Amino acid sequence: MRQVAWAAGLLLAACYPGGAETVEDLDSVITQHDASASFSTLRTYALPDSIQGVTSGQGQPLTIDHSYDAQILARVASNLDAKGLQQVDPTTTTPDVDVLVSFTLTRYVEYVSYPFYDVWPGWPGFDGYDGSWGVYYPYAAAYTVLDAGTLRIDMLDNRTPNPTTKQLTAIWNASMQGVPGSDLPSYVQRLEKGIDQAFAQSPYL
Amino acid sequence: MRPTRLLLLTGLLASSAALAQSNVRISYEFAVPTHETKDFIDRFSSRGAHLDVSLELSYAFNLELSAGLNSFNAVKQGLLTTTDGQDVSGKQFRYLNVIPLMGGFAWHIPLGHGSRLWAGVNGGAAYFDRVIDVGLNEYTASDWQWGVQPHVGIAFGLDKGTALFFDGRWNYFWERHGMPAQQYFSFGVGLLFGGSGNGSAKSSSTHK
């Protein structure tokens, strides 16, 4: 009977969902757009030749390697061209939209205290304590570390500037989010795949 | 007010204890989603359990109280459009946990030697907890939804007032607060306690 119970327990445990198993599983592409914007009349765009680093409001900013900027920008440009837009030189022609590409690389560190009694229940060394006790760290004890990267594309509409508020409207925005991992060329490939996906899931462009 | 309720409950339990058809059922359950539930999570659930308390009100007519848990999960690729207008693509890890809390009535037909057949309908509500993990983000939507739960079962008497049983339920919950209607079938196998074979035979003969 005990063996049957163990077998049933293992069977149930085997069926439990595991979630993400590789860094690729954590890749996602998010796009948003201004539903009132006129995308059908877009003809030209301008694209700066560098990717700028932007810091997140949370976490610790990390140093960005810019050795693949040209490759990533070329991928963005090829997708815009494929949508029928024409790249122009902003020094000679005012483009309909400015397409800005930025990158955020952030380390998130979580400091965690835990109920030690519940983690090692019944251990004789905890005699006199119970589950209501926790651990106090008089210093910063790193428990969880996650590096997250976001490549962001903003499409700013030069046709509808608002001089009163001094704002350009971002009529389209795409974020390629993920965990970079240690293999930079592989991460760049994933970003390029994400750029293609961002344009593929935006049929209104 | 509270002592009155306690007295009523005690009376009900005491009288039900005297009736041989009252029983408690505990079961392991798997479930198969259909319709809108299948659209959200297209994979059967192998994780579920149910606790049913059945109190005989009159011969073969039982009040049913039922609580359970059905956990679904699946991986899906595709585009997710959120309520705030984001289009999100990536590997979606989808989870659906359903906690139905029901009450209703059922007819229990004694077959002798602790075996029985039953069929009934429960009504009540279920808490639906929907979670989608995409990348580093999590999207959730949870709410109670009203529903019905027709069910049938068959038990085979073992000994000492226990029986092995198999049951099936159709779970339907109406649309609420923008959440679509939910449907799934669940099938259980478990143990029935109470309703001994001797008691059933005695109860049957009294009414013949």
Image (cartoon, rainbow, N blue to C red):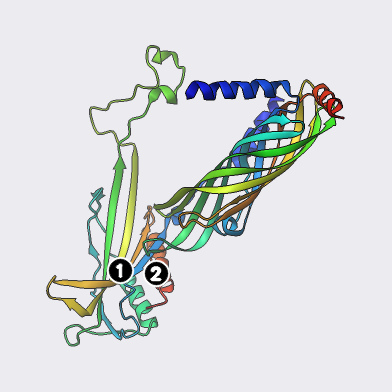
Front-lying residue, A99 or B9: B9
User: In this rendering, does residue A192 appear at all?
Assistant: yes
Q: Which residue is mark 2?
A: A198
Does residue B25 appear left or right of residue B71 in this picture?
right
The amino acid type of the residue labelled 1 equals Ile
For label 2, the crowd category at 10 Å Cα-Cα, with few meaning under 14, some 14 to 19 and many 20 or more, is: many
Picture residue at 80% right of the left edge, 22% below the top: B199
Does residue B163 appear left or right of residue A127 in this picture?
right
Do labels 1 and 2 touch, CB within 8 Å? yes
Front-lying residue, B126 or A185: B126
Picture residue at 42% right of the left edge, 58% below the top: A27
Q: For residue A153, which numbered disc appears in the image?
A: 1
Counting from the top left corner in percent of width and height, residue A113 is at 33, 30
Is A173 located above or below residue A62 in the figure?
A: below
Chain identifier of the residue bearing label 2 in the image? A
The amino acid type of the residue labelled 2 equals Ala
Counting from the top left corner in percent of width and height, residue A15 is at 60, 43
